[in-house]
Amino acid sequence: MNDAISNLFPQPVWKHFDQLTRIPRPSHHEAAVQAYVMQVGEQLGLQVIRDQVDNILIRKAASPGMESAPGVVLQGHLDMVPQANADTRHDFTKDPIRTRIEQDWVKASGTTLGADNGIGVAAALAVLESRQLKHGPIEALFTSNEEDGMTGAFGIRPDWLQGKLLLNMDSEDEGVLCIGCAGGANASTRLEYTPEAIEPGWIGYRLTLKGLKGGHSGVDIHRGRGNANKLLSRLLSVAESVCDIRLSSFAGGNMRNAIPREATGVFLVSASRTAELKALIEVHSDAITLELAAVEPDLSIELQPDTGAEYWLPQGIQQGLLDALMACPNGVMRMSDTMPGLVESSTNLAIVNVADGRIEIKSLIRSSVDSARDELCAVHQSLFRLIGAKTVIDGQYPGWKPDLNSPLLRIMRHAYQEIFDNEAEIGAIHAGLECGIIGGKYPGLDMISFGPTIRYPHSPDECMHIPSVQRFWDLLVATLARLQ
């Protein structure tokens, strides 16, 4: 780890972010980071509350002269997405993130950085700790398990928060004030089958795709990056149609909200057709590499012998599976009619696991239009029903409808103009912020999401722009002082 990041400016924010990189905190493994933020609050003598779903709320009284100011909720989530490159050995439940500085960027070595949303948590802790800032009553809300179901936000009691304004610090473009986000839903497909013993005279192979950029399935979905599950399905499908391969297993992706970067399929081919198979895979791999050369320069496709397979899928199950994966919606489905450049609806074929008599397929569906989200859910159910599989839709959460007349927006726009002599951009994001869920529990809550510049979240290329953290902090400080 590089201790230099704790000396960056603003130092109170970087100090806490540095500490957070040392605390393993993937979704569902947040006990240590919860203990850390609670300890900070308790050492400051503040009111610290933990609810039934492990959200942490820390209350701080207004600074002198600001007692009549409206209460502000500073909100961020404690967990991070655990993604590592194939050649990086890292246990996200035990190992700290290894950070480094490259020019104006903070990066991690082979893993996600956790700036999403560690920097928002760090900023809230810095506000709690400061004795110099001007602010009204503060509630720092640290939610649990945002990245894998938003269970913390869903579990917030509707009588818990006292503030009338909410600053969500989970956005990733400095200078943009976010006033809306997409809703979403999980589509989980399952089908069981009876594995069949492999017949004599068949040779096993392992086909691996790796080196894709991946990324956030909302923020990066419009970038045209390769989806490892879709690409592997494409190669296996053509191999099935030409060489009559038999599939043994398929494994790709591990997080719903991350575009899958790697996937592996194990299959068998008749010994008499191995040369034909190798030539076929080479031709189609070259075609895919050429197609994606501009966006996926590090894509690697490898075909290697494999002797570990003992069973294969029944042929009818295999054909239906590969057909369904080829047809499964993935990527941008529709762009917004009202906000130019914003994705309205998308899907991410995030996880495919096929082995030991069970097929599991998981997609994350996003849309800023609830009816469009529900229609895409129905498409998934209809598609996989054709092969006899059942698709369960759950985890639905609403979008956050933009309010251009927000008083909080007006204050933050004026503050940004005064500080930076420039206008802040007003936007929305094709990702699931907790604002939609929290706002549904607290009607009338005025909300803005903002943050420093973070690139490639949910991938090992995640990095945070150092100068933007100072501007993010300056805007936060100025906003709190103006809320009177």
Image (cartoon, rainbow, N blue to C red):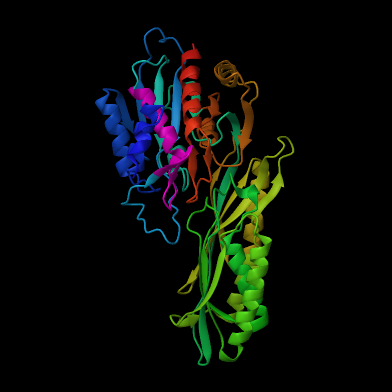
Residue lying farthest to the front in this orientation: 103
Res 156 seen here: no
Measuring 61% from the left and 63% from the top, which residue is drawn there? 230
The N terminus lies in quadrant: top left
Quadrant for residue 73, please give it. top left
Q: Which span is picked out in magenta?
A: 100-129
Residue 456 position in % (x across, y down): 53, 46
Q: Nearer the viewer, residue 289 or 198?
A: 289
Residue 403 position in % (x across, y down): 63, 26
How many numbered badges does the structure rendering display? 0
**Does residue 357 sit above or below 210 in this rendering?**
below
Q: Nearer the viewer, residue 387 or 25?
A: 25
Quadrant for residue 32, please give it. top left
Asked whether, in this view, residue 85 is left or right of residue 234, the answer is: left
Quadrant for residue 207, please give it. bottom right
Asked whether, in this view, residue 39 is left or right of residue 18, the answer is: left
Asked whether, in this view, residue 37 is left or right of residue 160, the answer is: left
Q: Nearer the viewer, residue 363 or 87?
A: 87
Residue 261 position in % (x across, y down): 53, 58
**Does residue 443 sit above or below 360 in this rendering?**
above
Q: Nearer the viewer, residue 158 or 432?
A: 432
- Residue 103 belongs to the span the image colors magenta: yes
Measuring 52% from the left and 53% from the top, which residue is drawn there? 256
Res 76 seen here: yes
Residue 388 position in % (x across, y down): 60, 69
- Residue 134 belongs to the span the image colors magenta: no
**Does residue 224 sit above or below 229 in this rendering?**
above
